[in-house]
Amino acid sequence: PATIYRQDYLPPSYLVDTVELGFDLDPARTIVASRLTMRRNPDSAERAIVLCGENLELVALRMNGKTLGKREYAIDDKTLRIPNAPERATLEIETLTAPRQNTTLNGLYVSNGNFFTQCEAEGFRHITYFPDRPDVMAKFTVMLRADKQRYPVLLSNGNLIEEGDLGDGRHFAKWEDPFKKPSYLFALVAARLECQEETFALADGREALLQVWVEEGNLDKTNYAMQSLKNSIRWDEQRYGLELDLDRFMIVAVGDFNMGAMENKGLNIFNTKYVLANPRVATDTDYAGIEAVVGHEYFHNWTGNRVTCRDWFQLSLKEGLTVFRDQEFSADMIGTDSGRAVSRIEQVRTLRQAQFPEDAGPMAHPVRPDSFVEINNFYTVTVYEKGAEVVRMIQTLVGREGFRKGMDLYFARHDGQAVECDDFRRAMADANGRDLAQFELWYSQAGTPVVRADTSYDAEAKTYTLTLSQSCPPTPGQQSKAPFHIPFAVGLLGANGRDLPLTIDGVAHGTGAVLELLEARQRFVFTDVAEAPTPSLLRDFSAPVILEYDYSDAELLHLFSHDSDPVNRWEAGQRLAMARLLKLTAAVAAGAKLELDETFINALRKMLSDASLDAAFREQALLLPSESMIADQLETVNPQAIHLARQFMRRTIGTELRADLFAQYDANQTPGPYSPDAGSAGRRGLKNLALAYLAAAPSPANNALAKMQFDTAGNMTDRVAALGALIHAEAEYASDALARFYDDFEHEALVVDKWFSMQAAAPGTDVAAVRELMLHPAFNIKNPNRVRSLVFAFCAGNPAQFHAADGSGYAFWAEQVGALDALNPQVASRLARSMDRWRRYAPALQLPMKKALQQVAKGKKLSNDVREVVGKALT
Ligand code: HT7
Ligand code: ZN
């Protein structure tokens, strides 16, 4: 397959001013009529009209009123070309598609009998011939015609301008979007749905109609999405002065969906997972996910839709910025400093869990990639989460007010345009009079930088010297890297645990400073330092780097108890735990005795019981690094040894802290009606973590507690926590509980997903058990949520079993990638990524992993999506 390069960008040959689309919707045979008014682009030397189209049957093609003969255009399986087209052209195109056959969930497809579209990145070309690229922005008018009984609701972007009966059992609706937009933001829905709706007063006095559309029987699960939408609108008005620009804003939930949600103009389409919630079926995590994703899609209205990407290499322009915005929104919704810190800790965990490994693997790419085979493979944690970190660093460098000035300038310059990441960086630099030229390397260089810190204290001169050195490992296609511009936040702790005042070059910095590391090696000298301090480095995780510093245990314990920066307080605990987990892993592999020191246990005990700290923070501080994070620290990965080591630590915590865990279990009950607010969720989180540690050291009393919680739970958070505890303790009652859980929720698809995923990720579940679960009548390989809940949860979330010594996990993976690829390449290629880092495993595992990859690569009808991923893994 062809590789596409960023450098090869050429402007479109023709621009499109208006698009009129007519749909005669039929699941077997939908007719799409399109009328495009086009004009030659003065910025292009190309004379031909070039339209993209895939899997379409062309029925008619007219230009300026005349049917084009076969010799007047050229067509292949991807492109329709009209050479020598006039300066201005009105094209009329009629095509046929078969939505019911479309299992890719890309383009126009059918889910549970209803019609939906997904056009990002290149889905529109599966609907009709069009210059399907984000730098072609046009005004859309859409006429939908469908059977009235079967599809009573007909939706598209913008405003409803006409609707009525067609007389033959069919009806129509005509929609007009007042804003020009690229084709990837087009959407339609034709369905039997119900909605919760409200009018909402906007800051400028206008009223907007807000709607959340769901399938019948789900109207009791839309309140939180609606509330989150209203909060998002308010937040964007207040924080960025950005208003909703439409009279109507719709969210539609669909059960078959490849990703989380899609920001189509005025008609956001969502995976049901990020809409439907009530206390009976949704956990605290689900509620938080809904708030974040509703916010994310809404914020795209400005960062993505009003200002969009010139080409798909610029994807992070909208995604990194919008993730940053949704992160800030969620943190502001909690409203406390401690809550903000917990959000930040969760972001750091995601980066370490998923982005750092990506940056160190065969798919590593810059935030703004230079090339791709299949753009769908580049909706990655690097583009999204590292992209958000890059935006966050700009805010750290220019300050919150400066960042707002930069945003204002960005919109003043680029509203209505399709632009590049560089345009965003330039707006930030110009609005603040800052030089962000070197900062550009964050967009162009892949890999996670390593910052090494060395310190020395001169007691006589009272100076403290911090030397920072940076480097970045090679990544595919980038052997050597230039130094990054790194904002590096620091504080110094005295022996009493308080922050010391900071003076650098005679300038007082209060108790916290943001150093700017620009060189490969740089020295920073703090003066008037009264005592030898403990350094608190990279506070608030001020840059997405790996920090190396030879902390002593005593220093880490000091930071864990006292650091005024909660993120670094948490970080100290993670370092203490990681050092021990690595030793334990080595001991397991060597067959040596496993031991855990009292000092560590006592530090955890103190943290667990410190009522002056929020429960949510304590929960974070007590969560251990995951098995895959431990794996990332090792040269050679032995997944079973890691698993046993971590289990040993969990069991020891459960045993040694038993009384304290019971006490916290009792102290963090949340009586009264369920509320997903951060305070209550934090208490439930700590209580359920206590339960999980107790379950790691099973005893009749511990198991009875889990059973009691399962039997009496008043909400899904407590119910799944109890079920998880029973499963992990291998309690006698576990299988009954699983059966009861299924019986109680078999009609709630999202809860059935939980039922599958808890089993798939359980330590006792091997490949044979997963295969058995795939035979369950509720399993459906065509539904991405179900596949994620079982196949992904096993392959990516149960490392000790997936990497079984007999290679059965890898054979299973190869089989599933192949089966999925025939149905849905986007989902298949995400599953394919779980073998990215096969070279790091012990030699006995590497061989069967490589064989499985080769087996997939040999597939005759492999999609470009999977071919790119396995090809890069094998290179
Ligand atoms: N902008 C969207 C990205 C997207 C997507 C969504 C659903 C299905 C397929 C998709 N391909 C790309 C989602 C977002 O980041 O907001
Ligand atoms: Zn997005």
Image (cartoon, helix red, strand yellow):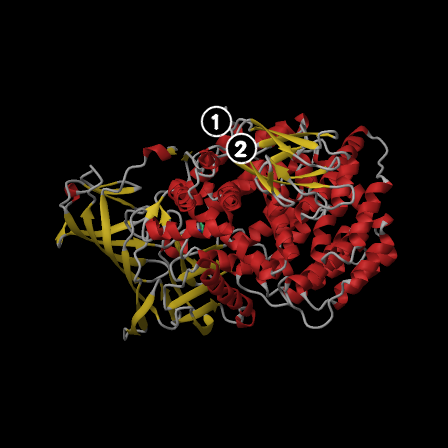
> In the image, what residue type sits under mark 2?
Gly
Q: Please state which of residues 257 and 169 is positioned toward the viewer in this rendering.
A: 257
Residue drawn at the location 46% of the way across and 68% of the way down: 213
Q: Is residue 256 visible?
A: no
User: Taking 291 as reference, is 661 left or right?
Assistant: right
Where disc 2 sits, the SS reads: loop
Across and down, in percent, residue 406 comes to: 42, 49
State the residue position of label 2: 447
Q: Quadrant of residue 843?
A: top right
Where disc 1 sits, the SS reads: loop
Across and down, in percent, residue 67 comes to: 14, 51
Task: Give the distance between the C-alpha atoms of the residues marked 1 and 2, in whole angstroms.
Answer: 9 Å
Q: Please state which of residues 55 and 664 is positioned toward the viewer in this rendering.
A: 664
Vertical placement of 253 versus 70: above or below? below
Mark 1 residue CB less than 8 A from any atom of ligand 1? no
Q: Earlier in the sequence, mark 1 or mark 2?
A: 2
Q: Is residue 164 visible?
A: yes
State the residue position of label 1: 478
Q: Classify mark 1: residues with Cα within 10 Å, few (<14), some (14-19) or many (20+).
A: some
User: Taking 69 as reference, is 120 left or right?
Assistant: right
Across and down, in percent, residue 669 comes to: 76, 65
Which disc is residue 854 wearing?
none
